Amino acid sequence: MSSIDPKALFPQAIAARVSSLAIAKGRAIAVVDASGLGAGEREALEADIREVLEKRKNVTEVRVAMMAERTARKLIAVGSGKGGVGKSTLTANLAIALARRGRKVGLVDADIYGPSQPVILGNQGQKPVAREEKLEPVPSRYGVPVLSMGHLVEPGRAIAWRGPMAGGALTQLVDAHWGDTELLLVDLPPGTGDVQLTMLQKFKPAGAVLVSTPQDLALIDAARAGQLFDQAGVPVIGLVENMAGYACPHCGEVSDPFGKGGVEEAAGRLELPFLGRIPLDLAIREGGDSGTPPAATDDALAQPFHDIAAKLDAWIGAKS
């Protein structure tokens, strides 16, 4: 078997990726460093290498071995004890805001029974493909790849699974081909059930963000969710108050249909950071329904999400 200098055959950008190249008895074997490349980039690189080698007269077979260091990936769970508090909207907007700050972010929609991220991120109807028995995340136009049960079942179809099946679904969504994604935000279902337990056992998060509306009932359930993370040794990064204040579009007067300041007060009692509050605004709901989350814009409504993302980004940086 004769070794060949990759620089003699390939352009500089490709040659820099080829760790070794040898040809023996008509078989060319190229070992390629694919670290940091996404699935599409890996495929394109392999195709370019094959094209060059297959043109050589002394080559009848080409084998390309793609090697890559495993990306050190952090999981951040976004949870609440109660449904309907805007957790999925917050998760999507935080993911977009972090991506705009330069983070390589992916999103796992772990709300198996009520997936909504395909609608919020505007890629409903797209299907993930499987490669080597693992799923490829579905891209979004905001630079945030996502996997959700909403991509795997027909829209509107009810999912009636027992706990072990839901846990298995979460495993498929998390243990996927995330490429060079360095951070996964996990949009958890409400409560403290099977999906949460599976995540804590198999994919322990680096930290958790809790979201609640200001009223007492939601805060009680958010506290339960916090207790679960505390028992599992997962630090709570902080609390977010959602639906905090409604400005009348006609007169501008601000009212508080869900109360005011309850989450910040709870954070103080629990000695946890308060990350910020998101207003109750029609445009946020419309953006989620239309697949155009506010954080993807430079509008005033984007600022609260970016402020919270900055605090989360600083926490992640301090833990790196």
Image (spheres, rainbow, N blue to C red):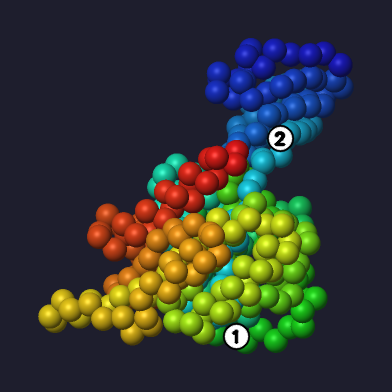
How far across and how far down the image is residue 284, in percent? 34, 71
Identify whether 159 is placed above or below 17: below
Query: Would residue 66 appear left or right of 180 to someone viewing this image?
Result: right
Residue named by callout 1: 157
**Residue 260 percent coordinates (x, y):** 36, 76
Instruction: Name the mark on residue 285.
Output: none
Q: Quadrant of residue 65?
A: top right
Quadrant (top left/top right/bottom left/bottom right) for the C terminus = top right
In the rendered view, would you say 210 is above or below 76?
Answer: below
145 relative to 2 in the view: left or right: left
- At mark 1, the secondary structure is loop
- Mark seen at residue 69: 2
Whether residue 89 is visible, yes or no, is no
**Residue drawn at point x = 67 percent, y = 64 percent:** 229
The residue lying toward the viewer, choosing from 123 and 287, is 287
275 or 44: which is nearer to us? 275
Indicate the quadrant where residue 194 lies. bottom right
Q: Which label's residue is closer to the chain start, 1 or 2? A: 2
Three-letter code, disc 1: Arg
In percent of width and height, residue 291 lies at 40, 68
Q: Residue flagged by tag 2: what amino acid is it?
A: Glu
Q: Considering the numbered disc 2 on the image, is that residue within a helix, a strand or a loop?
A: loop
